[in-house]
């Protein structure tokens, strides 16, 4: 599995974004970004959300592809989908729906699965 810094550079290449553009958009120095590549170090934890925002990925996609953990005492498993997939497009559209429409769609989905 790729390191976080390797994943960042893969995403930069996919998006056609230079290290300089990335530095400007994140506020992270170009020297720090170069260190990630050259020394194979990773960004600090406090920079992850800004990096994810600029690269338009979730922290889970950046950090692992999938992740497990505990949230509010509940064991959770996250599945990350490729941002070019139909699933990703569906989730983005679902996220923009009003609450009542989300509920209707989930009801329809339940009837399809059963």
Image (cartoon, rainbow, N blue to C red):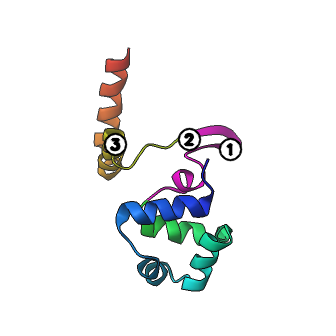
**Residue position for label 1:** 69
**Residue position for label 2:** 78
**Residue position for label 3:** 85
CA separation in Å, label 3 and label 2: 16 Å
> Which of the marked residues, 1 or 3, is nearer the chain's N terminus?
1
Residues packed near mark 2 inside 10 Å, few (<14), some (14 to 19) or many (20 plus): few
Residue 29 seen in the current view? no
Q: Is residue 65 magenta?
A: yes
Part of the protein shown in magenta: 57-77
CA separation in Å, label 2 and label 1: 8 Å
- x and y percent of residue 60 in the render? 56, 51
- x and y percent of residue 43 in the render? 64, 70
Quadrant where the image shows the C terminus: top left
Contact, mark 2 vs mark 1 (Cβ under 8 Å): yes
Q: Nearer the viewer, residue 78 or 8?
A: 8
- x and y percent of residue 14 in the render? 38, 60
Q: Nearer the viewer, residue 67 or 103?
A: 67
Q: Is residue 64 above or below residue 8?
A: above
| Residue name at image x 58 percent, y 67 percent | 48
């Amino acid at each position: 599995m790729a390191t976080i810094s390797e994943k960042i550079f893969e995403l930069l290449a996919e998006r056609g974004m230079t290290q300089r553009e990335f530095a400007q958009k994140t506020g992270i120095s170009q020297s720090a970004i170069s260190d990630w590549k050259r020394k194979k170090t990773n960004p600090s934890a406090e920079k992850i959300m800004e990096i994810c925002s600029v690269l338009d990925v979730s922290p889970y996609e950046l950090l692992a592809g999938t992740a497990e953990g505990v949230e509010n005492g509940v064991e959770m498993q996250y599945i990350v989908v490729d941002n070019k997939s139909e699933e990703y497009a569906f989730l983005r559209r679902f996220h923009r729906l009003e609450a009542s429409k989300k509920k209707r769609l989930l009801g329809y989905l339940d009837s399809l699965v059963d």
